Every structure is written in C-alpha cells, then in structure tokens.
Amino acid sequence: GQRMCPGMNLVNHFDWELPIGIESIDMTEVFGITIRRKEKLLLIPKSRL
C-alpha cells in the first residue's frame, strides 16, 4: 500500500499513457528463475491537475 511503498505515491499522482505510435502493451512473459515481461514497459507520466 501507500504507507509501505514510497513509490506508490508517485504512481497515484500521475496519469500514465502509452507513447505516441504504440497502440497496445505486449504482456508476453519470459520464464526463468523469475517470471518477467518479454518487452519492457514504457509509459509516459502526465501530471494530474
């Protein structure tokens, strides 16, 4: 939650958008010791007014 994770406040104070020209997010996973996304997540923060 917000009290446990200082970064959570940053997530809540912005609206997040995909970069121009990207229509969707690839949610494919790669398996190994841990599971991670095949493609890195790239979002643009927009200030909430």
Image: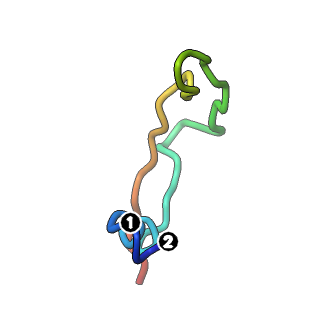
Q: Are marks 2 and 1 in contact (CB under 8 Å)?
A: yes
Give me the residue at 47% from left, 44% from top.
Answer: 19
Hey, which quadrant is residue 8 in on the image? bottom left
Q: Answer with left or right where residue 26 lies relative to residue 37.
A: right
Q: Percent x, y for residue 18?
A: 52, 47
Residue corresponding to mark 1: 5
Q: For the residue labelled by badge 1, is the local secondary structure a helix, a strand or a loop?
A: loop
- Given the current orientation, which residue lies at the most extreme left position? 6
**Residue closest to the eye, 35 or 18:** 35
Image position of 41 with respect to 6: above or below: above
Give me the residue at 66% from left, 38% from top.
Answer: 24
Image position of 13 with respect to 46: above or below: below
Checking the image for residue 40, the label placed there is none
**Residue closest to the eye, 21 or 47:** 47
**Residue closest to the eye, 13 or 33:** 33
Image position of 17 with respect to 7: above or below: above
Amino acid type at image mark 2: Gly
Q: For the residue labelled by badge 2, is the local secondary structure a helix, a strand or a loop?
A: loop
Give me the residue at 40% from left, 59% from top.
Answer: 45
Q: Residues within 10 Å of mark 2 (few under 14, many from 20)?
A: few
Q: Percent x, y for residue 14?
A: 42, 69
Q: Percent x, y for residue 21?
A: 54, 37
Q: Residues within 10 Å of mark 1 (few under 14, many from 20)?
A: few
Q: Percent x, y for residue 16?
A: 49, 59
Residue corresponding to mark 2: 1
**Mark pair 2, 1: CA separation:** 6 Å
Amino acid type at image mark 1: Cys
Hey, which quadrant is residue 49 in on the image? bottom left
